Amino acid sequence: MKNDQDQQIRRVVIVGGGTAGWMAAAYMAQHLRHLSLEITVVDSSEIGTVGVGEATVPAIRDFLAAVGLRDADVLAATEGTVKLGIAFQDWAEKGHYFFHPFGLYGVPARGVPFHQYWLKLQSAGDDVPLSDYCLCTQLAQQGRFLVPNPRPANDLGLFDFALHFDASKFAAMLRDLSLAKGVTHIDGRIEGVERSKGNGHVEAIRLANGQRVVGDLWIDCSGFRGLLIGDAMGVGYVDWRRWLPCDRAIAIGSENGGVAPPLTTATAREAGWQWHIPLRHRDGNGYVYCSEYIEDDAAEQRLRAQLKGVPIGEARRLRFTPGHRERFWQGNVVAIGLAAGFLEPLESTSITLIQSGIERLVRLFPDRRCDPALAAVYDRQSRLEFERIRDFLLIHYCLNRRMGEPFWDYMRGLTLPDTLQMKLDAWRAQGELVRYEWESFQEPSWLSLLAGFDERPRRYSPLADRVSEGELRETFARMRSAIADTVKMGASSAEAERQLRAAGRTR
Ligand code: FAD
């Protein structure tokens, strides 16, 4: 076995300078430094970026640490705020509320998950909600923040947090970082792509000013257009509108007077849902909707009518097709970001998909032959990740009880993918939480949704009878009081940056 140096990749070209392009550049410049690659980002300031994408999941902090950025510095540079989870308003029915935290519920005992004991007490008439056993939820609902203890005494103290940030400031921060790591930036509109007559690999792109840029490996971060993966390589798109029919969004900023709760809010509306993302200098708002159930102008009016503060700037209208590319890696082109696929931002998953795509590519980093065996592994893992997230999004819709509203009636009546149906059936049978490979959302997240929608199983696991009702009641009361004591130690979420600096660590 010998690595052929002539076949080593020398030039990586990233097409697109949105969040995906600059995340890829910063990460590859850091983690493939030993290969002395020439990394070039080509984008077009004339075309610009999609300009949304402001809420994340906790994995973003692994990415930041991996490229050498500290959470507190990112918060300061991007008008950022902390996020402990997502509040869901009106999803089950109007007036109904639940919270999806980045944290655990209760403490398991004698090999039995906590929620089985909770179900046992519920079946005995107890009505304390599951959320009372989650520190993260309690902090968020009281607008407080604590830097998570990396070694808590038990599961009760386990939680995490993510960030909200201004998307354009985040991309600018990553661009500066990438340039400092030796990445080259070319601003120019791409007008042509040259492919090899032999193996079909992309060899070069031509820009409007006549410049020709050559490369060995191409990362397509060109957004919804999919300039390389779609237009040049002809890879098709798997359309998931039959499950996730929302296909448009309107986004607008609004004034917030500097008040930023540590959570994203998703409120169900007649033909979709509305996001609220609190930043320091403004709120981000948007209505994600299905164009078959509401006209664009009516959707914009509804969004404007619901804003808490004075609107800032013009509303932006976006169109999308939920789904993903049939293949994510074709020849010497790998698609990352919106060029790879898109799922509505209900659980803030696009940036985390960008992150896992980049990490996967670095792990499988090929030579110039781009062995199709590596592409096959990359594709399989990417597809499974998309499918798992699709199922998780679907659960937000299919359990609704908003009877008589056409969009919600349709969503309740969907035939679900088998993977999701099996999960639901297992939960309904006996509170069993099924976990597949490549899940972005683990059992506590599924539990928060199932319990949040008041979806009760037919029975609890007989294993929960290992502990008597009396003992459970005492232990549960102790857990609630431990959580209440810890929440009192939390500071206002506006203090998060100071707390993070004082704690002096990222991850
Ligand atoms: P873009 O930002 O569109 O960048 C494309 C780049 O390609 C640009 O630099 C452009 O100039 C360049 N380009 C295109 N064509 C050419 C050409 N011919 N020549 C040269 N350059 C070219 N994600 C989250 O994680 N959380 C969220 O809360 C969230 N909310 C969202 C809300 C909505 C309504 C939408 C639509 C998306 C949301 N996303 C969210 C997704 C998120 O916005 C994207 O994943 C992220 O911004 C990455 O986009 P991108 O870099 O792939 O594409």
Image (cartoon, rainbow, N blue to C red):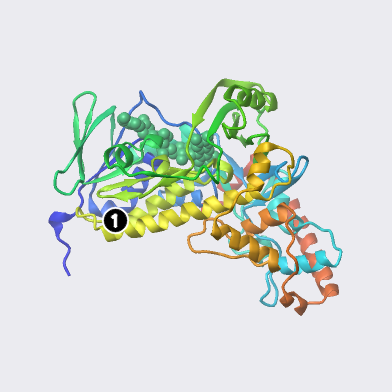
- Where residue 275 appears, as percent x and y from the top left, is 62, 36
Q: How many marks?
A: 1
Which residue corresponds to the image point at 70% horizontal and 47% vertical from the top-left?
400
Q: Which quadrant is home to the N terminus?
A: bottom left
Q: Left or right: where does residue 175 sit relative to residue 59?
A: left
Mark 1: C-beta under 8 Å from nearest atom of ligand 1: no
Observer able to see residue 490: no
Q: Left or right: where does residue 312 sit relative to residue 196?
A: right
Which residue corresponds to the image point at 83% horizontal and 70% vertical from the top-left?
474
- Where residue 466 appears, as percent x and y from the top left, is 75, 79
Q: Secondary structure at mark 1?
A: loop
Which residue corresponds to the image point at 50% horizontal and 33% vertical from the top-left?
52
Q: Residues within 10 Å of mark 1 (few under 14, many from 20)?
A: some
Which residue corresponds to the image point at 64% horizontal and 42% vertical from the top-left?
410
Q: Is residue 47 above or below residue 77?
A: above
Observer able to see residue 342: yes
- Front residue of 64/358: it is 358
Q: Left or right: where does residue 334 sit relative to residue 455?
A: left
- Front residue of 246/282: it is 246
Residue 307: name its quadrant.
top right
Provide the residue designation for mark 1: 365
Q: Amino acid at mark 1?
A: Phe
- Where residue 242 appears, as percent x and y from the top left, is 53, 44
- Where residue 419 appears, as percent x and y from the top left, is 54, 60
Question: Taking the image as four quarters, which one is ligand 1 found in?
Answer: top left
- Front residue of 472/116: it is 116
In the image as oriented, which residue stretches furthest toward the bottom?
Answer: 466
- Front residue of 427/382: it is 427
